[in-house]
Image (tube, rainbow, N blue to C red):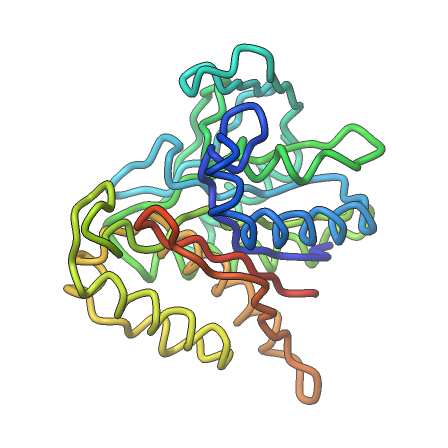
Amino acid sequence: MLKFAAITPHPPVIIPTIGSPSDFRKTAETRKAMEKIAEIFAKIQPDTVILISPHGPVEYEEITINSSPTLFGNFEQFNDFKSSFIFENDLEVTELLYQESKIQKVSIRLLRQPELDHGSLVPLYYLIKNHKKNIKIIPIAYSYSDKNNNFNFGKVISDVCGKIKDKKIVLIASGDLSHRLTIDAPAGFDPEGVEFDKQLIQALDNNDIRAVLNINKKLIEQAGECGYLSIIILLGVIEQLNKGRIFKKVKFKSLSYEGPFGVGYLVGYYKL
């Protein structure tokens, strides 16, 4: 059963073995919010994490579910040669997600890629710090071709997890917002980057799923983001969960937003 869902950024500089003291000062709000997410995670003590990352094996036409039995990763590309991670995949839930996606006509495929990307590892670094038992991971990468395919896959996640009563499952939508917020931003500056982040966060704060889905396609492209489709999958989950609820809808709780390096970092969650 799904117990919690969160939106997290993935800047490697919020990892102590990577970021400088200056980086830490500039990302103080993000790190504080990630610690809060970690606290909630520790209280739940989930069995499985479904983790959507934009830096996994992204395909244009199909969502990909990583079915490698063992998953590992490190931060060597960021000059951290000490940190390393190893996880077991939840192959039972992976297969259920795949089969239900096929039934629901969601374009999807399985692949085996044991190495995890930093879009997965940065959130996991925080989440597992106070976790007291072995946790299983299901890495997922969204598809580019059709926003609705991603949204409908979120509904599949909700339906499948709703049938699993013996496991506590958490969903993490990893992704940064606009990469074009300032003149010195990594993707260059575009004023539409600020507008995109503003519209997205306002829609999330208002729990307006349709407004997120209807953000102008050109605005999304100009923003140079990498988290929008991760969030779309998460919102598919939320819409499906809210469908049968009359009085108490699942609502978004924003914890922080900042863009110290010209990239938007949003942290927030849904308590399910």
Identity of the residue drawn at 18% across and 56% down: 221
- Percent across and percent down for residue 22 are 47, 37
Identity of the residue drawn at 53% across and 19% down: 73
- Percent across and percent down for residue 262 are 30, 50
Identity of the residue drawn at 61% across and 75% down: 251
Left or right of residue 89, residue 200 in this image: left
Residue nearest the viewer, comparing 221 with 82: 82
Residue nearest the viewer, comparing 248 with 159: 248
Q: Quadrant of residue 182?
A: bottom left
Left or right of residue 91, residue 201 in this image: left
Count of labels in the image: 0
Up-down relation of residue 176 to residue 18 (above or below): below
- Percent across and percent down for residue 178 are 30, 55
Quadrant showing the N terminus: bottom right
Quadrant showing the C terminus: bottom right
Left or right of residue 223, residue 56 in this image: right
